[in-house]
Amino acid sequence: MPEALRADVRTLGALLGQVLREYGGEELFADVERLRALTIDAVDDTNGDGRLAEAQALIESFSLERAGQVARAFSCYFHLVNLAEEYHRVRALRAREDAEPRSDTLAGAYSQLAAETSEEEAARRLGEIEFHPVLTAHPTEARRRAVSASIRRISDLVAEADDPRLGANGRLRIERRLLAEIDTLWRTAHLRETTPSPVDEVYTAMSVFEQTLFKVLPHVYRQTDDWLLGDERGRTAPRATPFVRLGSWIGADRDGNPNVTAKVTRQAAAIAAEHVLTALERETTRVGLAMTVDEQTTPPSPELLALWTSQRQLSDEVTSQVAARSPREPHRRVMLVAAARLAATRERDADLAYASAEEFLSDLRVVQDSLREAGAPRKAHGDLQNLIWQVQSFGFHLTELEVRQHSKVHAQTLAWIEDPASVPEPSVDPEEVLETFRAIAAIQRRHGVDACRRYIVSFTTSSADLAAVYRLAEHALGSAEAAPVLDVIPLFETFDDLRAAPRILDELLAVPQVQARLAQTGRRLEVMLGYSDSAKDVGPVSATLAIYTAQEEIAAWARRNDIRLTLFHGKGGALGRGGGPANRAILAQPPHSVDGRFKLTEQGEVITARYGNRAIAARHIDQVAAATLLAWAPSTEQRNTEAAERFADLGKTLDEVSRARFFELIHADGFAPWFARVTPQEEVGLLPLGSRPARRGLSVESLEDLRAIPWVFAWTQARINLTGWFGLGTALEAVGDLEQLRTAYREWPLFNTLIDNVEMSLAKTDPRIARQYLELGDREDLAQLVLDELALTTDWVLRITGHAYPLEGRRVLGRAVQLRNPYVDALSLLQVRALRALRTEDTEQRSPEEAAEIRRLLLLTVNGIAAGLQNTG
């Protein structure tokens, strides 16, 4: 572990120990330390599982109150370690800043592309790249907002303590504040008492915009632009174009979430607009106040004077006040009136408000051109350019809301329209479905078409599922002319639907509304691929290969039909839901499936991990943009094409054998109830993580009843991570040729990424702990099937990579996981105690209060394990 990180962890750990002593005395601290020592010793225990058994015995000796306190202590420790590691990433990023761009930066990718093509072609492609992260409220963030806020305050203090200019008094002051904040973290309830509403989730997402993205995006563009312009940076017009557009499903995704209504979607759009207009007003005021250039040194252009005249006609009161404060400063006057107009737009003052973001952007361009013509290019291309980039990136709507609904809901609503006597399922409200389209139309009138024009159809099985959306919109608004502008996006989720995608898309081109929309957009079309349900459907290996094949076929279909395709990747943070490093995944995609455009869902703890810190957010966006540009490089396309052809037979074997092995497990008699018994799946459903229900029915009798997120979350909690690797070991054994597999690992990017992601998943599994969970199910046959496959997969992955243990080749990350695992073991053993009490003990002899306390202990461990493993679903 790097020494600076080790020092931070030791300091925070010692301060937590002091807080524990102050709260619960030496006894609490001693119990935590004894359990910690036993789980660390158990890792290298040569005497069987003796130390593990001692740890279990210690846990059994705890009262429920003490067990809960110990669980909370380990959870707090992980939160502190996580923030220390996050800050060390920032520290490392600063230390790695070089004069020459690295290959995994956008500037480095541009250099490589220019070398392979030409400067002109590289510049053209750079100007066309698009990165479209879409925030979703899928319930995978286990932390409360209050806990997150406490962690952020501690993190700020850790950064402050790293300042070498601090003296002795400064360090004492920070230590005192750290103790106070860690004490607050300890005393803050770690479990939500109530389920957040969709509007709560919207406000949570706004914090990401306010804390990081609003400032980070112009920083990313500026960083690339400075490198491209060299000595001319700040003096000439920027070459970097704003390539990020932020999307959101929060408050708009109603598939399986009855809490998201048309009213909520309107609120979500209004909240986003309020936040972005407030931010733009504040930034415009700041830039305007600093624009103190005099009319003699920097004479205004005729266009600027004309703009000032038009502003005076809008409001003599506002312009008179501004003029009095800014004599002989025409550029400053125009900017401050623009800020006042943004306030009027937010307050819906029609006399002074801007009609659109484009009108505001036009005013900024007039100011910028005037400054440039007056010989002040640095003023023209400094903070003012950053503001222009912010307007281009966020508009007046901030996020592009995307509505999502299940195809069966549309079908049943249409049936009800045609025959009002027909009775839809209880979960289908036809009036609410129609009201959704009216809400979209209202949002477009108020905030612009881009604020809400995408409509995603879950479980698309035919073009009729997509045509139904247009029919419903026209019925809801009364006519095709009154209907909102819609880009209807098919979502292919199951194995069968992925294979049928090209046929369905062929049918889609015959839909008149689609033809009209293609003509309006320059033949742009989005297609969404679901990673979660496909992996739950056929297993992680087969799903990975099926999605790759679907991308190949859809990209070929798009080229045949002159479609400018954007593939939308519906991924989660966990490896069982398509997670893993985004930049590596992009470079492993089939040729022409990216072509400069990358769109994916960002959800739960991934949003915090990638966008919670400005430096890390900037690095992530830069890396994704670099990979998006490099995926367009001839060398990348050639490598991926040749590898896919060369290893096609290997892929076929991996697909068929892994799928059969996966089916052997999930289609076994009684599998679903067994799964619910050996994991905290039922209890995960009790956690108020998000407004969306965790399952489709009241109980889990089959996997179809269960959503993909709790399916992944539950296996992660049980330290098995089955959704990230099951079936791979048997498939690799069927291939049997180690040299061929090692060659594929070196030369086939898709296989390389798959193996590396599985290796990460295996590093967080523990057969000893997994056995504790599996024994709760009284099905030795299924337990042994899982453990055998785990051993086989581990053996083959290590042989292919040449590693002695998982992540040996990634020294810092591997060591960090190794150091965390014993602490996670302690929480896992506490969780097993709670599960065993709920699953196997005589519940009739237990009071309701005791049962509630056991569940509370279990849920505390769920939060702690999620923090320790740093992923949930």
Image: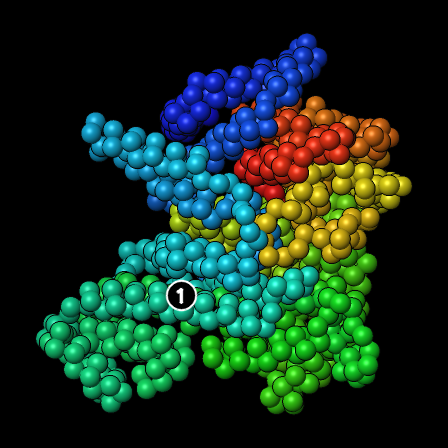
User: How far from the left and from the top, in percent, is residue 651?
Assistant: 78, 45
| Residue 773: % across, % down | 72, 30
Image position, residue 132 (x, y; %): 53, 61
Q: Is residue 606 left or right of residue 271?
A: right
Residue 14 to residue 587: above or below: above
Choose top left, top right, bottom left or bottom right for residue 826. Answer: top right
Q: Which residue is mark 1?
A: 275
State whether residue 728 is above or below residue 414: above
Q: Is residue 242 left or right of residue 489?
A: left
x and y, in percent, of residue 193 in the image:
54, 48
Q: Residue at x 50, y 46 (%)?
A: 144
Res. 304 visible in picture: yes
Crowding around mark 1 (Cα neighbors within 10 Å: few <14, some 14 to 19, many 20+) is many
Q: Is residue 652 left or right of residue 361?
A: right
Depth check: 279 or 541 in front? 279
* Residue drawn at x 36%, y 57% as measured from the top left: 215
Residue 377 located left or right of residue 555? left
Residue that lies at the very extreme toward the top in this rendered image = 47
Residue at (74% x, 51% y) in the render: 706
Q: Amino acid at mark 1?
A: His
Instruction: In this rendered view, identify the residue nearer to me: 298 or 280.
Output: 280
Residue at position x 54%, y 55% in the image: 196
> Where on the picture, by quarter, is residue 667?
top right
Q: What element does badge 1 sit on?
A: helix
